[in-house]
Image (spheres, grey):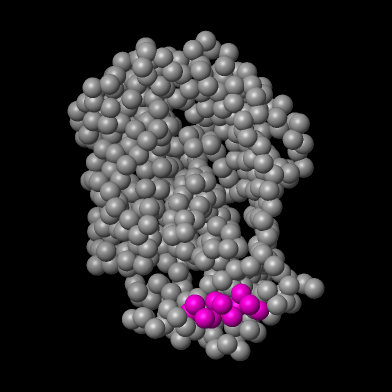
Amino acid sequence: MSWKEIAGYALETSRLRGASYADVRVVDDRQRMLLTKNGKVGYASDSESMGLGVRVIAEGRWGFAATQELDRESVQAAAAQAVAIARASARVKEYDVQLAPEAAVQVEWASPVRVDPFSVSIEQNLGLLMQVDAELRATPGVTLAEALLHFRRYEQWFYSSEGSDIHQTRTITGAGCAAYSFGEHELHKRSYPNSFGGQYQTRGYELVEELKLVENARRIGEEAVALHKADQCPEGRFTIILDSSQLGLQIHESIGHPIELDRVLGMEANFAGTSFLTREKLRKLRYGSELVNAVADATEAHGPGLGTFAYDDEGVAAQCTPIITAGQFTGYLTSRETAGAIGAPRSGGTMRADGWHRIPLIRMTNVSVLPGEEPLTLEQLIASTDQGIFMQTNRSWSIDDKRYNFQFGCEIGWEIKNGRLGRMLKNPSYSGITTEFWNSMDAICSRDQWTLWGTPNCGKGQPMQTMGTGHGAAPARFRNVQVGSAYKGN
């Protein structure tokens, strides 16, 4: 029996029970994760999860149910439960759900992969991680070394009562390492190439090969130890330059979450709160300087981000939505239900679920700040800065529930003096107000310095769903920023 036939039982049951709309996702989710710690296997898992989720509209409200039993009776029971939930919700409804129109499509798509990561043996993977581990611990003073590989193949079949039939497969690869050094009552950490597990993209094993983990591990260990002797980052107002990975998280927290329209409308507030970006600000708010151009782009042309796909979980094609245009706020992340709230004729295609057992939510795709148009390297950016602080790799973050006031800490910093990097600084941090911060950006490096970073652990919803998001960023400079208050007195 094909998945289409099985999904057909759910669609037909939904219709017979009175649903005006239904969609079905059959998902096969395979993951492999390997983690080493100080020369030993710290964690190893190889898992697969398969099931079906059915979402319906009945009496103007949503209902959702899921099952791992993919026989006719179980699928029909799940569809009946989804309709029953919708009818129960309708008893307290304030309005009927209206979906923005979307043409039905029949599509097959798979993300480009040069080397299937699941084709690489576990022995070869562990061998690589042990080499990285040895390099991390080559410097005396490294007290903990971690190295990670994470592979995921997410295959989904989507069918709707409107006639869509979409089969897409996304292969995701993640890799990274970190060195910790504890001593003299301080703990310092250095991560490569990014914190929170390293770099993640919708690619194959070729990403692991390009990251050159072994070649960079010794430097990471040396920096973790050297931070103990570094000077404390000063407190005050400074010019700062952020590396692209830290700017990626800045984008995630202070642009990506505020533009989620379900937060703006009060439909979702868990974990990341609501948003200061109320609807009257659309096309009126000066979000940043004229150099700030941000997009939410899920298309392949944008790159292999964790927010790259062909169709979202409502069957809407991947799109590029301008979010900030020359500093002006121009767009939200929308769904078929919420698009009408801002007068949009079509969904922005941002609905995604973290598995077959979860209902889709508005999630960031690849929310990126575009690089500068004029050629500018990081070295040239530093050379054009008389005095300031260069900060690299996120260590901590805090942001209020409207995404307006924030504070970020980085793993390492360097003083900039007369256009050159000077002494190493420990515990660098900065804080500000979202719009003031983005309006203070006066330079951003060009395309050759731009990286599409993957954030694999964005949490949202209740029950909580974990989603991968992409954030393209290049090193950028910000003027008159409050620095150093997070670790004052350390």
Image quadrant occupied by the N terminus? bottom right
Task: Give the x, y percent position of residue 102.
Answer: 53, 77
84 in magenta: yes
In-front residue for pair 13/413: 13
In-front residue for pair 461/88: 88
Q: Can residue 243 be seen in this view?
A: no
187 in magenta: no
Q: Tell whether 341 sits left or right of 87.
A: left
Q: Which residue is drawn at 37% across and 19% down?
A: 186
Magenta segment's dominant SS is helix
Q: Residue at x 63, y 84 (%)?
A: 13
Quarter-of-image position of residue 239: top left
In-front residue for pair 463/335: 463
Q: Is residue 201 visible?
A: yes
Q: Residue at x 22, y 34 (%)?
A: 482
Image quadrant occupied by the C terminus? top left
Task: Give the x, y percent position of residue 204.
Answer: 67, 44
Up/down of 401 relative to 159, above or below: above
Q: Tell whether 416 sits left or right of 208.
A: left
Up/down of 260 relative to 41, above or below: below
Task: Give the x, y percent position of residue 339.
Answer: 40, 72
Q: What stretch is highlighted in magenta?
A: 76-86
Task: Give the x, y percent position of residue 77.
Answer: 63, 77
